[in-house]
Image (cartoon, rainbow, N blue to C red):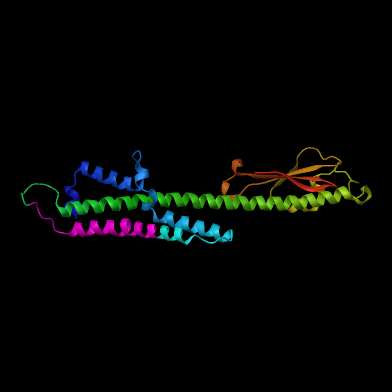
Amino acid sequence: MKGKIKRISALGWGGIILAGISLSIPIFPGWQSFLDIGLANPWRIANSIATILAIDIFSEGVPGDAIHTKARITALLSILFFYILGPGLMILFGLKEETKAEDGSNKLSVTMIGFMAGLVITISSLVTLTIETISMSAVHENSRISAKKSAVTDEVRQNLATLASESYEYWVLPEEHGGGSRSFEGLNLDQLPAYRDLNGTYSFAGTPSDTMLSITGSGLPEFTGGEDSSRVSVTVQVRPPDDIIRWEDSR
């Protein structure tokens, strides 16, 4: 096999690598319409099937067996071609003794052509695996970040609901019982029992009035390293007696 590798010129290696990459990535104009990029990527096909099935189950629909069967067959053919046939050709013809052409010329033999074809397919499979590994790592990281931000948002909303409920109690109670006698004026967060035990940052948005109180809460997911761009913020309005709690905005 080493002898065959050495026989390939620099120009030949350039052509092999370019051909291998082009099987996975449509690098030429119009190439994507000729070659389905998903054919070289069974892992992406498998992820698509799993996503479609999950959507069907969630929506209580009936999965389209024909579509899924076609996708499974495509994934199987892709695995056979790129991850079994390609390396198989490279190893088989790489270990096979090469015979010179009958006329004694330096023309490529069938053995060498088979070896180079195996190289092209194998390089294509390696390119696909590399791209998919990087892509899936990014997807998983984004999912992890999104999940943590969602968890922080849910916690902030829960805490705001507690503060809003206690603020409403203050609005209802008469002054002799420590309340505001149907007004939020004079209220500060330290007067709310739950405020001292909550995670996150909370403050009044604007000045409390007789009929409305706005509280903004924000939290920073642990993974962000203190970057304010990743901070989640939610605002709740307490507007008795009609709208006790109204969620104003969220991001």
Q: Which residue appears farthest toward the right when viewing the image?
A: 176
Location of residue 30 by image quarter: top left
Q: Is residue 198 visible?
A: no
Residue 88 covered by magenta stretch? yes
Q: Which stretch did the figure color magenta?
A: 73-101
Q: Is residue 119 visible?
A: yes
The one of 103 and 127 positioned closer to us in this rendering: 103
Q: Which residue appears farthest toward the left when viewing the image?
A: 103
Percent x, y of residue 182: 89, 46
Left or right of residue 174, residue 155 in this image: left
Quarter the C terminus occupies: top right
Residue 172 covered by magenta stretch? no
Percent x, y of residue 2: 19, 54
Percent x, y of residue 188: 81, 44
Which residue sits at x=60%, y=41%?
229
Quarter the N terminus occupies: bottom left
